[in-house]
Image (tube, coloured by chain):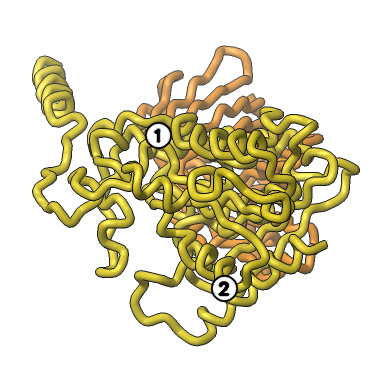
Amino acid sequence: MRKTLLGWLVLFLFVPWVQSQTTTAPYELGVGLRLQKTEQLYWENGFTADYTSDFLLHKKIHLKMSYVTSRIGSAFMTNAVRQDNIIIGADWRFRSTKNLQIFAGLNTGFFNADMEQLSQFKDLPHSSLLLQLETGLFYKFKFPLVTSLSIGYNAVSGDGLTIPGTLFPVYYQLSVFYYINK
Amino acid sequence: MKNLIYILSVLIAVILTSCNPSPTLDDKTMLDYGQISYVNADSLSKHLLSEYLSNPTPIQLNTPVIIAAHGYTATTFEWDELRAYAKTKGTFYVSQVLLGGHGRSYPDFKKSTWEDWQSSIKEEYQKLAKIGYKKIYLAGSSTGAPLIINMVKSNFFKPDSLPKGIFLVDPIIVSSNKTLTLVGLLGPVLGYTTVELANGEKGHWYVYRPQETLKELMALIDLTRIDLEKGINLPTGTYMKVYKSIKDETADPVSAFMIYKGMRTSSGGNIDVEMESSNLHVFTRLEGRDNITADQRSLQQKVFADIESLMKK
């Protein structure tokens, strides 16, 4: 199931990009790094990509995917819980023709906390679907770099019963993108 | 633009004027009211071993003693059943510590810090060590657990009076209620939160939780989580075991995993963790709850017996 979803996502993101090499369809594809701090919990860092095109309501809609993990954050060389977030989503951009844009979006994805296959903890919830609301600022520099600062809310968060306990509600992100085709 | 500034000014004024509301304290049966007190001389002499057995015999000095610390907003009531078990068996003593700021009144609780809560555990430990008790153990339920872990981390225990062991029941390192992570932002607007108590629990727990103490609680568990991430070693010869309900709407069960990863014995070994089939928070306290099952009673007795047997080793 996950492989199928990933396959569709790759097709969705990259087929228009390949097409754009042979046509003149304007599009933007940015890839970059993300730093994420969860309120009262971990640093989870990773990679992110952002794609838009004229057919996405004249670049008002942006599609994005990201992977952030505590493995290269708080859990690096420490006893913090190793956890991974794979996220896809879409943003609506206000002021989409300006350098300073405001965005609001909705994400979904998959969260997994590594319980290290310890038998005592085999019954603890360790994975969950994600449902996130995000908003923030997006600034385009003159060179092909873009930075964004955002705040997000996990609508699904740990409850001590069925959802992993290290899935916390509020997080902050700083992302830097390099736009490949700019 | 002027309209926007006007609306923002009104909103800020409303938020500021409604900041930090206090509850109405008009019910004398509430612990919060201040009429019921756990800090009077009678209560202290009944619950603290340093008070009720201050001149022990040599045999009594060699009997294991558990200093039991309760959780946030609770009182010594939380460990009454372990004390009763110990009395029946006659193989160990229980000294029930009342955390600082607890068991008094809402205003007293509101101004207390987590260091105040911890101070009474430290005082009782020092008193018992001074009297000469040789086999001192600690037990912490819920918030009692990070308070004890912090004592280990801060090297409170001196080489000539190290604890023999530490037992943690439903320790809290991560709250199940994740809204609490926002208490720093929302606290001043909320002022306090309220909990529903069963009839048998009334008078033993605070009903109102001032945002100031919720912030203290979050500061304590955040500090403890970070300390565990860095790693904490137990003193030489000190044993640790965690008992944790698999489902817990107060202390997230992942707390046990964090303690397992973060605590090490003095020789670098793992501590013991036992996940229990329970959905109660502090499952060892059944008194005062409604609708207790035979399984819950059996689990409580099993854990008490386990603690007793571990102290015989």
Mark 2, residue position = B88
The residue lying at 69 percent from left, 40 percent from top is B132
Does B63 sit left or right of A55 as displayed? Answer: right
Identify the residue position indicated by label 1 in the image. Answer: B215
Among the chains pictured, the one given orange colouring is: A
Q: Residue at position x 63%, y 43% from top?
A: A66
Q: How many marks?
A: 2
**Chain of the residue displaying label 1:** B
- The C terminus of chain B appears in which quarter of the rendering? bottom right
Q: Foreground: B13 or A120?
A: A120
Residue B190 position by quadrant: top left
Q: Estimate the x, y position of residue A82 in percent, counting from the top left.
A: 72, 47
Inspect this view and state whether residue B77 appears: yes
Q: Secondary structure at mark 2?
A: helix
Q: Amino acid at mark 1?
A: Lys
> What color does chain B have in the rendering?
yellow
Q: Quadrant of the N terminus of chain B?
A: top left
Q: Residue at x 45, y 19 (%)?
A: A99
Label 2 CA crowd tier, 10 Å (few <14, some 14–19, many 20+): few
In the figure, B234 relative to A145: above or below? below
Sequence-wise, which precedes: disc 1 or disc 2? 2
Q: Residues within 10 Å of mark 1 (few under 14, many from 20)?
A: some
